[in-house]
Amino acid sequence: MRNKLLLGNWKMNKTTTEAKEFAAAASSLLEIASAHHVDIGVAPSFLSLEAVRKALPAAFIVSAQNVNEHDHGAYTGEVSIPMLKDIGIDWAIIGHSERRSYNAETSLACNAKIKALLAAGMTPVYCLGESLETFEKGETKAFVSTQLKEGLKDLTPDEARKVIIAYEPIWAIGTGKSATKEIAEDVIGFIRRTLREHFGPVSEDMRILYGGSVKPNNVREYMECPNIDGALVGGASLNIDSYRELLEGMI
Ligand code: PEP
């Protein structure tokens, strides 16, 4: 059985003080989540990772929002995998659409990061999804299929099994215009079939999340879909009451 997963992406929000306040209030949610086979986590900014990690129980996932694939070197402004591991962080979001747009990250660049994370025993959350233009042209599946092929290039089935996929249509991120559960399930079902073609039966163990304007009032709809294993949530994960309601909607 695939555990459901609620992962909050805080983007460039919250000072370390605010992040610690959230963590103190969120800590008690782990027991409720675990009792219902839901994994929960947050992805604070690099600056707050250590404080949030220390403030939460080990089973509460604390993820980076990005990482550099090189262990060390002349990469000004970057953060490496050993730096994350040193402070107890073993998850990282890779290829979020904002990084693809503002930092020109390609799926092949994501592939290098995913391989480096897997080699270090860490968990990558690989984000993909199409623009409004691609969606309106009816080319979503072809687009997503290329992102999958490039992002997961040369992975063995055993490695692929450890990757979490987040389908996030760009037109739904931060817009309040979420994909219907039918659209999300259709694309995520397609992603699972594509994973099966590439990696075989391990595709049934792989968790695939939906992201894009998930809110407490619509999260349950997605969770009722057979292929959707959880949610990657931006805006609605920032407030502790809303985060708790998201969890309640998943159990
Ligand atoms: C995200 O940041 O991954 C996201 C889905 O944002 P939002 O929930 O605000 O649309």
Image: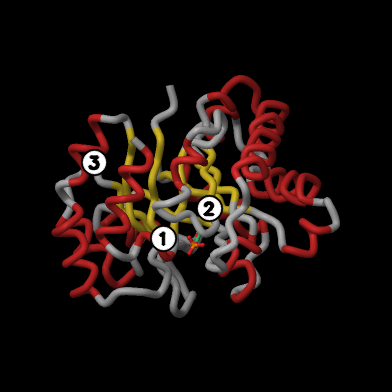
Coloring scheme of the render? secondary structure
Q: What's the mark number on residue 9?
A: 1
Q: Evaluate if marks 3 and 1 touch, with contact meaning CB atoms under 8 Å apart.
A: no
Q: Is mark 1 within 8 Å of ligand 1?
A: yes
Local crowd size for mark 3, using a 10 Å CA cut-off: few (<14), some (14–19), many (≥20): few
Which residue is drawn at the image coordinates 67% and 44% (left, top)? Answer: 183
**The quarter of the displayed image where residue 34 is located:** top left
Residue under circle 2? Answer: 211
SS category of the residue bearing label 2: strand
Q: Quadrant of the N terminus?
A: top left
1 or 2: mark nearer the eye: 2
Furthest-right residue in this view: 137
Q: Is mark 3 within 8 Å of ligand 1?
A: no
Local crowd size for mark 1, using a 10 Å CA cut-off: few (<14), some (14–19), many (≥20): many
Observer-nearest of 143 and 154: 143
> x and y percent of residue 144 in the render?
72, 48
Q: Evaluate if marks 1 and 2 touch, with contact meaning CB atoms under 8 Å apart.
A: yes
> x and y percent of residue 207 in the render?
50, 35
Q: Amino acid at mark 1?
A: Asn
Which residue is drawn at the image coordinates 65% and 49% (left, top)? Answer: 151
Observer-nearest of 183 and 115: 183
Which residue is drawn at the image coordinates 57% and 59% (left, top)? Answer: 95
Residue 119 seen from this side = no
Q: What's the mark number on residue 59?
A: 3
Sequence-wise first label, 2 or 3 = 3
3 or 1: mark nearer the eye: 1
**The quarter of the displayed image where residue 52 is located:** bottom left
